[in-house]
Image (cartoon, rainbow, N blue to C red):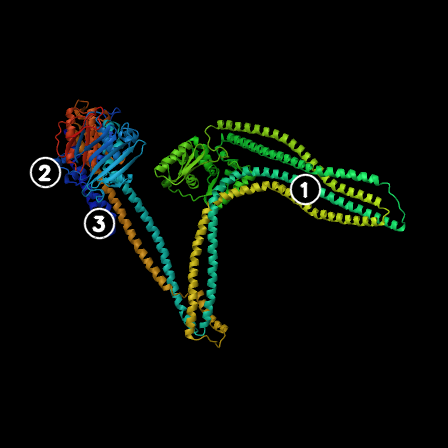
Amino acid sequence: MVTARSVYRRGRTEESEDEAESSRRASIKKVKLERRETRSSSPAGDAAIEDEENGRSQRPNITRDEIELQRRSVDDEEGDNYEGEDDGESRGVRSSFPDDIANVEAYERLASRDKRKKRYGKPSDAGAIKSISVIDFMNHRHTTVDFSPKMNFLVGHNGSGKSAILTAIAVVFGGKASSTGRGNGLKDLIRKGCDKATIILTMNNSGHEAFKPDLYDPEIVIERTLSINGSSNYKFRASRDGKTIANKRDELQQIVEHFNITIDSPLTILTQDAARTFLQNANDVSLYSFFLEGTGLKTLMTQYERLAINQQSLDNIVASSKEALAVKKAKVDDLARKIKQSAKIESLIAQSKRLRQELAWAYVIEKEQACTAAQEDFDVLQEKVNKVRAAIEEKMLAFKPIDESTKLLEREFTDFEKSRQLIQADKRKAELRLRTARASLQEQLDTHQDMVDSISKLDEKLAGIKRRIAELEAAQTETQDPRQASLRQDIEKHEVLLTKLTRELPNREATAKKKEEERDHIVQEIGDLEQQRDAQEAEASRAKNTIRNLETQVSNRLSAFGTNIEAVLQEIDAARWRHSKPLGPLGRYVHLNDFQYKDVVSSHLGLLLCGFAVRCKEDRVQMMSILHRCSKQKGYRPGTANANMPPVIQHTGDLFNFASGDMSNHGDTMLSKLRIDNEEVLRILVVQRNIERIFVAQDVQVANRMLDDFLNRGISPVVIHSADKYNVGGNHNSRGTSTIGDWQGNPLFLKDVQREIQHHQKILETATGLKAKFMSQLTELTTARNLAQADVAAAIRKVGEIRRAIPQTNLKIESLRGQLQESEKENDQDAFEEMRRSTENDRVRMEEERDAASRSLPEFRENVAKLEKEVRRYDQRLETFGDELEAKREKHAQMLSNREGAEREIAHYKKSEDRYAAQLANSATELTRVKDAVANWTEQAEKIAPRIETTDSPKRITEKRASIAETIEAAKKRGAVVNDDLHPAHAAAEKGYNEDRKKVEQLEIFCKLLARSIRERQLWWGDVRNHIAVRARVLFIVHCQKRGLEGRLEFVHEKEKLLIMISSGTQRRNENGESTQPGWKVPRNLSGGERSFSTVALLLAMWDVATSPVRCLDEWDVFLDSVNRGIAAKLLIEGALASDQKQFILITPQDMSGIKIGPEIKVNRLSDPERGQATLNFAPQ
């Protein structure tokens, strides 16, 4: 002490002391004057510094000695520094601490005064722990401990459960199990063999510092139940009636914030392990942070920073309000100009009113016409509203499937190939039906020709009969025909043939039908095999393209997003852009951190990662043009495995804050698995794909467990993508699981390129083998199909032959019968006459059959033409297949843009609906007004005069009024208007302008006052920080001196460091052997007892300036001997008694028999648990 004083006197002269003191007094006086002016300036200023006044009311009462103590140490603190050797044993400080001596003397004067006047701190009315009960918690079955509002010692042998009580206090206030050092989770704190544990803590809650005194009076009861499954719940009750008031954790947060209880701070609870290694493990920065958090200064600093941000926002509002005032001022001036112009044409309007009587009924007619026009306008607007609403419904219906359609369209290219194969199969079937129809047509033509030939034969027969009749009439001689026997034999033979053909026809038709079915079955198998062959061919082609792309990716990662993409990038660099150069491909900025999710991330983001992003519509059109041009001319192919152009996203470039929607704090999201190098690309993926809200899981089972956990925690809705490509999601009402489609494009995220190449080479080999197998089967089936086709043709040809042979045989039989009859009756003229009539009848019948056949020919020809047209249509569809493919590509690009434009269109239509609805309402009002006007004008005209004919025609009257109207119109064109609403509008606009101007002026004054208040608060914060630091420093010195130690707290505020130095009295010596200054040590080089005592001294110093009402310390005397333990205990008791509204709970394995127990000092003793004991024995003293 003497050495420090002498060094201080040598280091500072009286003159420098006077100058520094004068400077400090002038600064303090200036701050006081500014604050006094601020308080008296305006009510707005009082409001701006209300928080500051409230903060001052919580400041401790600073006496004159304390102010002097603070002033003496401000400058010296900023200049403290270290110098010493690396081992830390002789790590020194500056040569002296001159202010410490004066500060300690000031503190001792204050302490002596308080001791003489017997000033002691008051017990806490609110915030102190009254009691705690634990049930099945750690090693306690059921234990209750009551506490004094001041000093409490919890003693007992090791294993008696002392630390468990401290752990229960930490847990019930929301502390984590890991921070207590008693387990990794809350379920580890449950007594073995039990499924839950309960902690009930009772707090005092009275006086003006009480929390919600209308609900919790006079005590707060907090009950927390821990379950073996890891969950927990709270109940908050009032001791008055025991009724549960709340059960949410938010209530606990409000309670600890109200009483300034920071449960994770060592100033509140210092656990056993932390107490042993507190000073040894802490560094300078953490000790300073410990100082700020424990004293509440960090919270004030954060509030001041937030207040400064708000003040800047107010300045921005003032600036924008001034701009709006200029617009309103221009509007007021414009209305004033219109009023002046209106006065010039009022005289003309007076002349027009003199013709009112003569035009009264003309006005009625005009109003009637206006009514009709208003009705028409109303109908037109009503129709527009209906159309817009219909359009909105249509867009809403179309918007829902747009996203699904976009995804489905990607699969349509595969389905399109299948459709082409189906078209080819349908064409083959149509060709087969065409051949059958042509055969049927030819058969019908042959039948028709047979009928024509039969008629010719009948004509010849009829001519012969007629000649025979003539001969009989000429000569009546009898003759006998010897051919009758031969004719009868021929008739019998043809009748047998007819019977055979009639029986054979159904069998032949059935055979032909069976042959056709067999052939169609073979054709169907060929079509199926062709589809499988084409699928394997497409798979092999994709594998080849993928292998080529992977080989390119070895040297150029960008090739993953498109073949020859360098051509696109070159054109982008060479082009001129309206806003800025596009971003892209977007995947170049995206990297995957966890490769087990590469498939599901590729499926979700692949299409977008191959795309580009622009800032305006014109740049989007140019970008699309570049992509199409490079695709046609330079071999560019997107990495999406189809011919569609990748999407071109139009974005605003706004780097908005999406933290409110980020779910990463609840679990792994797709965003947390990605590293994105561009902030704009990050926002695009957030907007387009919600990567910040989609969770990821290893598999679908884990995803379902995650969904259950999220829903139990109240997180809804939830979407989870698993690495095995399942989509799991739902809310409290429903849930579902679906598969995620494979990404068909190039591999986007690669960890081992060579392994990927080998994998796709295996796929290529498999696809090539299957394709060869299908080709072999196709060759066999094609041969079988040709043979079946030949069998079908032969069967159809045989059926046709039979069908033609049956009528020919009938005709032959009839012909033979006629010849027989002719032979039998050739000498009978009547018989020949009958034969003639019969032949004529046969001819008529044959003509009818011929005509029937002729009528059926158009139907057969039409069927053939229809089938030929169908085949041509299939040919055209196959020829235009490429055009349809290009159309589908364009459609895909369009659908991608439609999804972006759908919402804009819906918003546009809704805006139009609002506009038209407003216009419709105005039109309805106008229509009602016009109808009322018609009635009113009619009533007024009748009051003026009955309906009469004027001497002047309506045209003349109109011409007179038109002359006046033209004069008025000319005035209007010069800028004059007549409007009765101008004066009210001008008055209202001027009034609004004046009111807004006053508001802006007042707000501007408030902003200036607020800015000055913020500066004062920051100055005040610095003063309070220095004061608290000096007080803690002095108390640390005083407490260390109780054991004969020299202790120093060195605050380096500009570097946010707190250095602790301890000296045990060892003196350093110079070269001459003279004592110079004590040898200082850092905490890690202290002995166990010195470190324990230094920890107690530091905690007492910090506790004196901390805001928390509860202080808990475990194993505080672990390394102290009996003498030092007594000194430390006395220090703790004196500090507790002197503190105001603070409670101390200290744990020690010692019996504390030397402690004097009183109303403010209580010793709670826990006994060792006995075998089979249900509850712990507890005996308060």
For marks 3 and 1, give the one nearer the viewer: 1
Q: Is residue 354 above or below residue 893?
A: below
Q: Which residue is mark 2?
A: 117
Residue 819 found in image quarter: top right
Residue 437 is marked as 1
Can residue 422 be seen in this snapshot?
Answer: yes
Q: Looking at the picture, tell me which residue is in the foreground, 340 or 895.
A: 895
Residue 758 is marked as none
Q: Which residue is mark 3?
A: 39
Tag 3: Cα neighbours inside 10 Å, few (<14), some, or many (≥20)?
A: some
| Percent of width and height locating residue 154 | 18, 29
Q: Is residue 158 above or below residue 855?
A: above
Q: Secondary structure at mark 1?
A: helix
CA gap, disc 3 and disc 2: 36 Å
Q: Secondary structure at mark 3?
A: helix
Write the residue at 77% across / 48% down. 842
Q: Which of pointers 3 and 2 lies earlier in the amino acid sequence?
A: 3
**The C terminus sits in image quarter:** top left
Q: Which of pointers 2 and 1 lies earlier in the amino acid sequence?
A: 2
Q: Amino acid at mark 3?
A: Arg
**The N terminus sits in image quarter:** top left
Q: Amino acid at mark 2?
A: Lys
Q: Which of pointers 3 and 1 lies earlier in the amino acid sequence?
A: 3
